[in-house]
Amino acid sequence: EKSEFVPQSEGYVIQAVDLATSEETLADYTAVCTLQVLKDGRMLVLDVQRAKLGGDGVDDFIKQQYAKWQPSLVAVEKKGYQLNVVQRLLKTTLPIRPLDEKGDKGARAIGPAARVKEHQVFFRAGAHWLQDFETELLLFGGGSEHDDQVDAFCYAVLQAMKWGSMDWAKAYGVYYCENCGTGYYLEPADRPCPKCGTRPPVKEPVEVKPEP
């Protein structure tokens, strides 16, 4: 394949997390994919990391990956036990976006696979995680033991496809605290800042008068 230079300072960065299916076992991986979305809609996979963790180790792992790349958004699936993880992370200063994606793994992979085929997704040449990640991509759907990296990658690409090059804060509903400037996901609408506790201003209803 032909290599291209992609500017890492352009666009915005998002992360997606595929959580292990249970907090009780270390048999499954938790994976984090970090994706840069360029102004023209192309995507650069900056990093793919995974680890077998239990308990608070999952939270710490996600926080470490956030600190490394400072993404605009961290998307985390909220199903089963995973909802507990999401609820814990929502109490932090991380810009967490709960995900409730529909369909199975194969259905979710259709859009991202098309973008890869169209040469709209780039991987970092020489990255230490690249060989393992590409192997998992090639074996996906063929009975491979693990597909956590692929799942995290698909979640990230689907979020990027959904919003394209729009302003990420506006697109994802991220609110900046007027007191300390911390960005966080505003759900419910009166959620206080997880850092300083300041609540967002209440929006007064606007009266709309019918045209005469």
Image: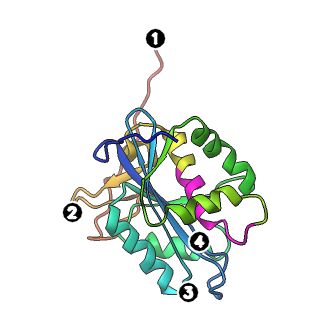
**Callouts 3 and 4 close, C-beta under 8 Å:** no
Which amino acid, by three-letter code, is at mark 2? Answer: Cys
Q: CA distance from mark 3 to mark 4?
A: 11 Å
The reply to whether the magenta stretch includes residue 207 is no
Q: CA distance from mark 2 to mark 4?
A: 30 Å
Tag shown at residue 54: 3
Q: Position of residue 105 (x, y in %)?
A: 72, 57
**Residue segment shown in magenta:** 144-156
Q: CA distance from mark 2 to mark 1?
A: 45 Å
Identify the mark nearer the N-term, 3 or 4: 4
> Which one is in front in this view, the residue at disc 1 or the one at disc 3?
3
Which amino acid, by three-letter code, is at mark 1? Answer: Pro
For the question of whether residue 155 can be seen, the reply is yes
Q: Which residue is mark 2?
A: 180
Identify the mark nearer the N-term, 2 or 4: 4
Q: Position of residue 28 (x, y in %)?
A: 64, 78
> Which one is in front in this view, the residue at disc 2 or the one at disc 3?
3
Identify the mark nearer the N-term, 1 or 4: 4
* Left or right of 197 in this view: 28: right
Residue at 54 percent across and 48 percent down: it is 157
Residue at 54 percent across and 41 percent down: it is 162
Q: CA distance from mark 1 to mark 4?
A: 56 Å
Q: Position of residue 130 (x, y in %)?
A: 50, 61
Which amino acid, by three-letter code, is at mark 3? Answer: Gly
Q: Residues within 10 Å of mark 4 (few under 14, many from 20)?
A: many
109 or 208, which is in the foreground?
Answer: 109
Tag shown at residue 19: 4
Disc 2 secondary structure class:
loop
Q: Which residue is mark 1?
A: 212
Disc 4 secondary structure class:
loop
